[in-house]
Amino acid sequence: MNKFFKAVLLLAIAAFLGESLEFVVNMVLAKELGEVGLGLYMSLLPVVFLVVVIASLELPISISKFVAAKEEKYHKSMLMHAMRLTIVFMFCVIGLSVVVLPFIPVFDHYHPIVRWLIILMIPIISFSSIARGYFMGLHHMGKIAISNFLRKAVQLVLLVLVYHFFHFSMELAILIAICTLVFTELIVCFYLMYMYILQFRELKRKPGAALSAQSVRKSLLEVSIPTTGMRIFHAITSAIQPFLIKMALLKAGLSETIALEEFGLLAGVALTIGFFPGFIAHSFLIVLIPTVSASYENRDYPKLQKLLQQVMGLTFLYGIPVVLVFYHFAVPLTNIFYEYSKASSYLQLLWPYFLFHLFVIPLQAYLIGLGLIKDAFLHSMWSTLVAFALIFILGSMESLRMTGVILGMNTGIVLLTMMHYLTVCHKIKVTLWLKHAGPQKIG
């Protein structure tokens, strides 16, 4: 367990630095792009993340589970088959993207080059995913931590330098922001692949056992396909959400410009601040997936139960003070971006969303590690449907507007957390109060 929490601490420190830089990045973007420009940028990001999810095929998850559960002698064979699978899949995704992306209307409001920048990210993400998954499975969290920090540091330096020495129109300023995003991913890919090649050379010197390509593909795709499906669903709904919110606000009587500004304040300011402590939850996720996978493979229920108690306890320990700070210091926090904006009230109303989000991430890692990816997917689907219905219905009311949107978001995250938690407790045989609930057998 010491190894587990040392890895979490290392990732959390690096992620804290990275999130601090991300916070500054969003401040730079807010001041350079303005409220409308920030709204346009934030509306595009979910589409970028969707392409990233598809390109990665969730290989970091499936490879880390494989490496954590299997002996080292099988790793070289698995990685070689994984590389071939990645190359084939990458070319398929690039071909599909070249055909589809030019006709997606969401890009009509952006510079034409943006489409090709997103296509360029596909090979970058595909190759870095293999290295990331391998290091996660080996618990080499230092390399993961450096890559996460590097991503934000490079992006911030590029944005500050370019925006300081040059002035652009809104369209070009957004294009520059996307360019820095892509270049940053390229730098991270170079770092991860360099470290991966060094590690792979060491692996080749050791005796290994061959695996069939079919068995490796089956092992990886059994995890990757449902996990990718879940992430694609989340990415698609995240891409739809900005337009759903704007549609609801338009129906409530706001103009298109005001609706875009309101969304920019929600996504670019309130959510940026509220998601800041999520680096701790994401650090748990990265370490939990291989740890839970290995423990479940060994049928070590006491370790699974104790680990869940500790993770939930630590999440309470830092989550409650965090949301209290957000609620009581909403005005000075949001004034960092825009003075006396509505974002402060949005930040206060979203406190349940931020708190339960901190629990959802490690619980989702547990579900993946326990092989309950289908359950996690169904939970996400039902909670999103409920949230979207409430966002549109309540957000369309003139008396509620953005307050109604936030109520819908809060309801969705609470429902998702409860479904995840109940399923994990049932699977590892503990009560809702995390007490032993019965015979420890595989269910």
Image (cartoon, rainbow, N blue to C red):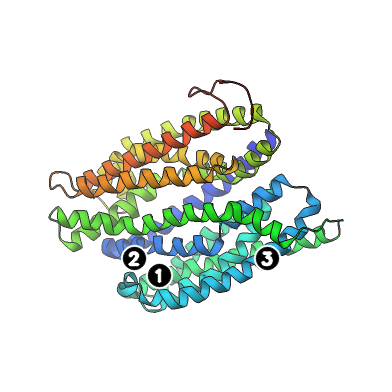
Which three-letter amino acid code belongs to the residue tagged 1?
Answer: Tyr
Name the residue nearer the viewer: 380 or 161: 380
What amino acid does circle 2 point to? Glu
Instruction: Measure how far apart labels 3 and 1 are at the Cα level.
Output: 38 Å
In the image, 245: left or right of 126? left
Residue with the mark numbered 1: 163
Placement of the N terminus among the 4 image quadrants: top right
- Give the residue at mark 2: 32
Crowd tier of the residue under label 1, counting other residues whose Cα lies within 10 Å: few below 14, some 14–19, many 20 or above: some
Residue 210 placed where, x, y %?
Answer: 80, 58
Q: Is tag 3's residue or tag 2's residue first in the polypeptide sequence?
A: 2
* Residue 83 circle label: 3
SS state under label 2: helix
| Label 3: how many Cα within 10 Å (few below 14, some 14–19, many 20+) | some
For the residues marked 3 and 2, what is the alpha-carbon distance in whole angstroms? 40 Å
Circle nearer the viewer, 3 or 2? 3
Q: Earlier in the sequence, mark 3 or mark 1?
A: 3
Q: Are marks 2 and 1 in contact (CB under 8 Å)?
A: yes
* Marked residue nearer the N-terminal end (2 or 1): 2
Element class at badge 3: helix
- Vertical placement of residue 30 versus 378, above or below: below
* Residue pictured at 54% horizontal, 48% vertical: 15
Type of amino acid under label 3 = Met
Provide the secondary structure element on which disc 1 rests.
Answer: helix
Residue 16 image label: none
In the displayed structure, 374 sits above or below 323; it is below
- Residue 73 visible in image: yes
Cα distance in 3D space between marks 2 and 1: 7 Å
